[in-house]
């Protein structure tokens, strides 16, 4: 079976989702450049991405905090480890790049963590938007800093942290 793709319209913008031949999510890209990211061998098969679409809609409504989709992002062993650490950041919370590097056992790997997060192929579901600068500033996000801020504020409100400062 070939990989499959679909464009999903969400409150946070259009997203291109791609699943592999086992229907595990290999990428979720946000933004207008998404059609250029469709793998050449992939077929447009919206039915194979129904669970992705459903869970994104639940997230966007505030009723889903954790995704339970099979994931198969492609990356180096370090990237895989960094992305697994992202999955452990609770909904509505943030961590700094330094905190993530410490969790990986190497506080000196802050820049490597930033590069790994920047290469995250499964935006939103592997929540790299929850990582901020050590000083609390918003830094880097493939979907742009306004979207990162929107996602963080959305999660804080739905997690009951709306009365606390964002950063």
Image (cartoon, helix red, strand yellow):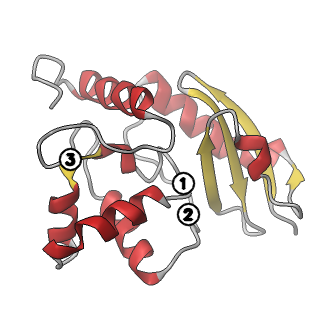
Mark 1 or mark 3, whichever is nearer to me: 3
Element type at marker 2? Answer: loop
- Judge left or right: residue 33 versus residue 13: right
Provide residue 16's location: percent of width, then percent of height: 69, 43
Provide residue 134's location: percent of width, then percent of height: 13, 49
**As displayed, is residue 82 above or below residue 122?**
below
Please tell me which residue lies in front, 81 or 133: 133
- Judge left or right: residue 25 versus residue 22: left
Q: Determine which residue is flagged by label 3.
A: 133
- On the rendered image, what quadrant is the C terminus found in? top left
Provide residue 104's location: percent of width, then percent of height: 22, 74
Q: Residue 122 carries which label?
A: 1
Task: Tell me which label, 1 or 2, sits earlier in the chain.
Answer: 2
Task: Tell me which label, 1 or 3, sits earlier in the chain.
Answer: 1
Residue at 71% from the left image edge and 62% from the top image edge = 23
Q: Residues within 10 Å of mark 2 (few under 14, many from 20)?
A: some
Mark 2 and mark 3: span between their CA atoms? 27 Å
Q: Determine which residue is flagged by label 2.
A: 71
Residue at 18% from the left image edge and 19% from the top image edge = 162
Mark 2 or mark 3, whichever is nearer to me: 3
């Amino acid at each position: 079976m070939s990989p499959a793709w679909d464009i999903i319209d969400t409150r946070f913008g259009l997203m291109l989702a791609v699943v592999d031949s086992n229907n595990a999510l290999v990428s979720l890209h946000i933004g207008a450049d998404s059609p250029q990211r469709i793998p050449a061998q992939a077929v447009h098969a919206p039915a194979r991405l129904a669970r992705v679409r459903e869970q994104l809609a639940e997230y966007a409504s505030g009723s889903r905090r954790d995704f339970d989709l099979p994931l198969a992002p492609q990356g180096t062993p370090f990237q895989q480890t960094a992305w697994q650490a992202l999955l452990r950041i609770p909904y509505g919370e943030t961590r700094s790049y330094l905190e993530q590097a410490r969790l990986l056992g190497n506080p000196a790997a802050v820049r490597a963590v930033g590069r790994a997060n920047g290469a995250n192929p499964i935006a939103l579901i592997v929540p790299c938007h929850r990582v901020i600068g050590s000083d609390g500033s918003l830094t880097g996000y493939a979907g742009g800093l306004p979207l990162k801020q929107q996602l963080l504020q959305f999660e804080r409100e739905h997690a009951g942290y709306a009365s606390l400062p964002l950063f």
